[in-house]
Amino acid sequence: MRFTDDFLQLIRAFVRFALPLLLMGALAACSSDKKDTYIARDVEVLYNLGYKNLERKRWDLAAKAFDEVERQHPYSEWARRAQLMGAYASYMDNKYDDAILAAQRFLSLHPGNAYAAYARYLIAISYYEQMTDVYRDQKTTEQAADALEEVVRRFPGTDYARDAALKLDLVRDQLAARDMEIGRFYLKHEQYLAAIGRFRHVIDNYGTTSHVPEALHRLVECYTALGILPEARKYAAVLGYNHPGSKWYRYSYALLTGEDVAPDKKPESRSFFARLLGIFGG
């Protein structure tokens, strides 16, 4: 019994004095683990460390090494290279926002640098990779379009501009598809003026996309529903002239005349289009 009492007193003393000290030490160790360790190194050593990690596809480690180059040697020639290499490493690691920020920082510090074209291209494709489907918000898609247009405008004739132009076609097609989706919704719910705004936006801003024939036909539908037949005929004429083999042309022709037209029939005479416009009395 005496042994038990002594043991309990020993435990109480441990809890009162020793345990708090151990907990404090553990907390200190945890907090020190969370701090970034600063180790001064030569710029070449840091840069080569980042490059080796790039070769091994250790993107996160590469980005951190390149960031360390800039932090420890901010005024060196290596720092400028490291900014872009770090941006590229973040891009490859699917950390697109980090890549955009790094490339934008590079451009703000070195706007006339020989690698400015690459930095702008990296920003553009980082936005491009984050595009969502047409049923979601298209803010990132619009940012991708703006960034790609900037590359094409600023660096014509370069490989960056050529690739940006190809991607820009896809981006514009998606933006047009989004407008068409919203326009169809308005049309379905008989909100014709709102629908007309969307369909005209496709024609005015995305005139080279595959959505233009449908947009023209939807305008025919809207103006017909509103009873504004001259406008309906005008858009039908444009549709028939530019896309005579399109199914959307056949739909518009049938809507206005009550007659179907064979898929292989392509009326091209001036009298046909004049009749659609109502010049000869419809």
Image (cartoon, rainbow, N blue to C red):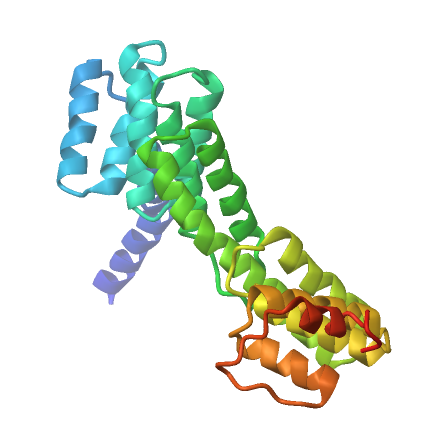
Residue 41 spot, x, y in % from top left: 21, 16
Badge count: 0
Residue 62 seen in this snapshot: yes
Which residue corresponds to the image point at 64% horizontal and 58% vertical from the top-left? 203
Name the one closer to the observer, 213 or 265.
265
Image quadrant holding the C terminus, namely bottom right
For this view, does 98 lie left or right of residue 72?
right
Can you see residue 186? no
Q: Give 198 or 30, whichever is nearer the viewer.
A: 198
Q: Relative to 16, say whether 46 is above or below.
A: above
Q: In this view, does 73 lie above or below 128?
A: above
Q: Quadrant of the N terminus?
A: bottom left
Question: Please, is residue 167 above or below residue 8 in the view?
Answer: above
Position of 225 with respect to 179 (left or right) is right
> Against 181, is 30 above or below?
above
Measuring from the top left, give residue 222's x and y in whole percent: 76, 75
- Which residue does the image show at 50% across and 39% down from the upper left? 149
Q: Which x, y percent locates residue 141?
A: 52, 52
Q: Which residue is drawn at 28% across and 44% down?
A: 92
Give the residue drawn at x 54%, y 75%.
Answer: 266
